[in-house]
Amino acid sequence: MNNQQIDCGCDTTPQPLLSIDEALELLINSVQITNSTQLLELHNALNKILAVDVQASICVPGFDNSAMDGYAINLQEEQINISGGTTFKITDRIPAGSTGNTLASGCAARLFTGAPIPKGANTVVMQEECELIENESRIEIYQPITLNENIRPMGNDIQSGDVILSRGKQLQPQDIALAASVGVGKFKVFNKIKVGVFFTGDELIEPGKSLKQGQIFNSNRYALVALLDKLDCEVINLGNIKDTLGATCQALEKLKSSCDLIITTGGVSVGEEDHVKPAVEKLGQLGLWRIKMKPGKPLAFGSIGNCAFIGLPGNPVSVMVTFLLLARPFIKKMQGASNYLNTTFKVTANFDWHKAKLRREFVRVRLDRTVIPMQVNQYPKQGSDVLSSMVWADGLVEIPEKRTFKQGEILNFYPLNEMML
């Protein structure tokens, strides 16, 4: 937990509709990065976020070594670029992990990939370019030879003192391998942030039970928890609570002292049965934002003590889209990640957009990789209740406000698989 007051930008003045860029900037600027860290062994550090730079204390490689199996030779100036019939006496054999003797002029040492280059050697000839002669006591080379061929110099990859991994990097397999190559045995990483969740609504029923008239299964609970699990959060899940102001206040009180962030879905409107908004306002502070985006117009942000609060919309697609576009960057920055913003790439729309909208739309689409450049096709039903569209889609395309276009328009594409990381 952080001991810093969160500035949620809340005030009593009604706010105009925010653009998604303005809303994201407000969220990002309010983040308090976790200061809780731990040391982890390399094999436990995958996907964790570095809390400090990792610096090399050695050079890699630590010595000049051979890039391939062959022969190290002591090449004299008069032998450089001579074509045909140059011979060298084999005086040593150096496997990887061994150190050879000093190589005299006109001599060669049999050596293998990764083996140290012996003193006196100034080039390596690959074995396929050498012919053994005189009962395999000498080699003969028929092509021109140049200096420093096939030698990996000391520090070719990493110099001692180099920062090889930077604070805020989410550790991938190649990062762990690189740290191991310089002898790092443990990483100092940020601890998981704790995110509390609960769900209100007397109409919500757990999957597996029988529905009565007017009831729905609570898909938002499982979507939100799964999204948080994918982000490696520690989730404190209170499940469904009674749809009363008292029960909502009790849930918030229970979570605020043990969590870095609380997220709920729905219940932040001004209806008589929407208790999350008055409960947060009673215990802390809350700003209710209206964002010029579809799906997901309403978003609440505030705090209860030192615990941040995000209230997502209630419709299932709106929950997922607003989480990915707004809550995810907030969480990633809170976790200490240096790359916390969503990335996009350009695609070509394989559809027309006939009606200009006042809100920026994020349309569920699927990539068509059979054409170059790649095109995207939109799901035919784009309602915020159509959860099947999220299963069908590869990602979201961003359609700017007040825009119409014909097939072939270039749009920003948000890949779902990357936004789940």
Image (cartoon, rainbow, N blue to C red):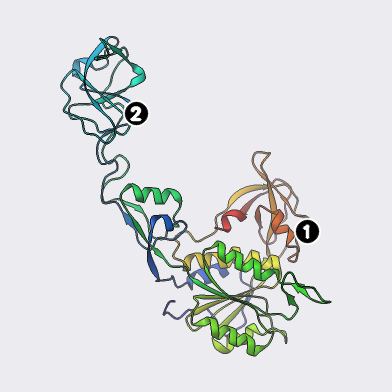
- Please tell me which residue is depicted at 68% across the width and 39% down the height of the picture: 370
Vertical arrangement, residue 278 with respect to residue 42, above or below: below
Q: Name the residue beneath numbered marker 1.
A: 381
Vertical arrangement, residue 132 with respect to residue 222, above or below: above
Vertical arrangement, residue 71 with respect to residue 210, above or below: above
Evaluate whether residue 369 shows in this view.
yes
Q: Which amino acid does label 1 sit on?
A: Lys
Q: Where is residue 400 in the image (x, y as percent from the top left)?
A: 66, 59
Helix, strand or loop at label 2? It is loop
Tag in front: 1 or 2: 2
- Please tell me which residue is depicted at 39% across the width and 48% down the height of the picture: 177
Of residues 76 and 243, which is closer to you in this image?
243
Q: Is residue 14 left or right of residue 153?
A: right
Evaluate whether residue 295 shows in this view.
no
Q: Which amino acid does label 2 sit on?
A: Met
Using the image, tell me which numbered label, if any, was put on residue 299. Answer: none
Q: Name the residue beneath numbered marker 2.
A: 68
What is the distance, in whole Å, between disc 1 and disc 2 at their CAs?
59 Å
In the rendered structure, are the residues bearing label 1 and label 2 in contact, judged by CB atoms less than 8 Å apart? no
Of residues 411 and 67, which is closer to you in this image?
67
Q: Position of residue 388 (x, y in %)?
A: 74, 59
- Of labels 1 and 2, earlier in sequence is 2
Q: Where is residue 104 in the image (x, y as percent from the top left)?
A: 15, 22
Label 2 neighbour load within 10 Å: few <14, some 14-19, many 20+: some
Q: Name the residue furthest right.
A: 213
